[in-house]
Amino acid sequence: MKKKIRIFIILILLLGVGIFFWNKKNDSLPEQVSISLENRDIKEEIYIPGNVYPVKEIELKSQISGVLDKIFVKIGDMVEESSPIASISLVPSTLELEKLENNLKMAQINFQAAKLSYERSQKLFEAQTISQATMETAQREYNSAREQLSSAQNQLDIQKTGKIKGNKNISNIVKSSISGTIIDLPLQEGASVIERNTLNSGTTVAILAKMGQFVFRTQLAEQYLENIHLGDSISLVFNAYKDLRTQAKITKISSKGTLENGIMKYTLEAEFPVQSQMPIIRSGYSATAEIVLESKKAVPSIEEKYIVYKNDSSYVWVKKADKLEKKYIELGVSDGKYTEIIKGISSNDKIVQNDSAN
């Protein structure tokens, strides 16, 4: 009998302990940090890498083919318009000399013939035996033959001496076309140079730029274009100067895109002036653009870490008495830390994290 009583007492004790720990477990469930909707100013931004270049950057090229004889400047020099940059010497070619000598002989023959015809026409016109139109034709032919003779003689002299004289349209001196700064000299003295003409772009002797106005250039994915417009201001941060920040104005968004890794991208350009207090900005410097896509003030929002994303929906866990309730929400603008809540919860809801149930 006593043994049965002891067993009964032990069972009662075990049952009590179980009930105690069961209640303890249930009591600890709601002990979670909760938050509520708060009104905040939120800016949604993107960060796009790119490079900066002078707005006006010009490649200086030679008018003749030959050898780079002398460079008169060095990188970093500031030059005025029409300043001499380099000189080009021609390299005489035997075949070319023979060709030019034959051209000169032919031009001399044509000139003598045109001169005799013109002199004869003058006498006939004075004798009133030819019309004025005939006289004017002879004069034009004489003038043309004289110019061709001068050109043939000049071309031969150029090949023989390597220098150009008496021709205002062609020069062996490469001159600056604008006032600016020499930012690159891609060749060394003695290098071969090809003239710029309709058949080829020619050899670049020097690169000249105006350093007072720069342009930031990058490629932008099409998904952002809806919120970006010409004239918008963007912030630029430079890799070379961590503390340098400047504002640039968007001046170009290309109409035609290019496909990169399955994403259509468009060229974006934004210009900015180089202020006197700024450090040296060099052509090609890397920079990152901070572009505001959308900005809202005093909107209801929560921290991003409380939002659960699943498939195409998003929701939060809301504490209701001693249980958690899932509420689906509609999101708005986000700055990466805080996200606007358009609908789905109210300011009275207590929002918690529930990682185990996600």
Image: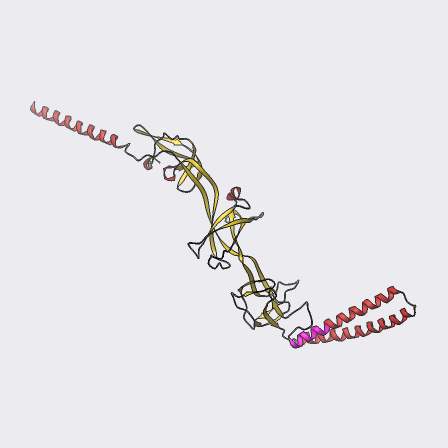
Classify 28 as above or below 149: above
- Residue in front for this viewpoint, 168 or 105: 168
Does residue 262 appear anywhere in the picture? no
Q: Residue 288: image x %, image y %?
A: 46, 51
The residue that appears at 87% across and 72% down in the rendered structure is: 120
Does residue 297 appear anywhere in the picture? yes
The image quarter containing residue 305 is top left
Left/right of residue 110 with respect to residue 316 in the rendered view: right
The residue segment tinted magenta is 152-161
Q: Residue 115: image x %, image y %?
A: 82, 73
Classify 42 as above or below 152: above
Left/right of residue 136 with respect to residue 75 in the rendered view: right
Q: Residue 173: image x %, image y %?
A: 62, 70
User: In the rendered image, which quarter contains the C terminus?
Assistant: top left
The residue that appears at 40% across and 40% down in the rendered structure is: 338
Instruction: State the count of labels.
Output: 0
User: In the rendered image, which quarter contains the N terminus?
Assistant: top left
The image quarter containing residue 160 is bottom right
- Residue in front for this viewpoint, 260 or 146: 146
Magenta portion: prevailing SS class: helix
Left/right of residue 268 with respect to residue 353 in the rendered view: right
The residue that appears at 47% across and 56% down in the rendered structure is: 286
Left/right of residue 262 with respect to residue 113 in the rendered view: left
- Residue in front for this viewpoint, 298 or 224: 298
Classify 355 as above or below 96: above
Q: Residue 144: image x %, image y %?
A: 78, 68
- Residue in front for this viewpoint, 247 or 150: 247
Queried whether the magenta region covers residue 179, the answer comes back as no
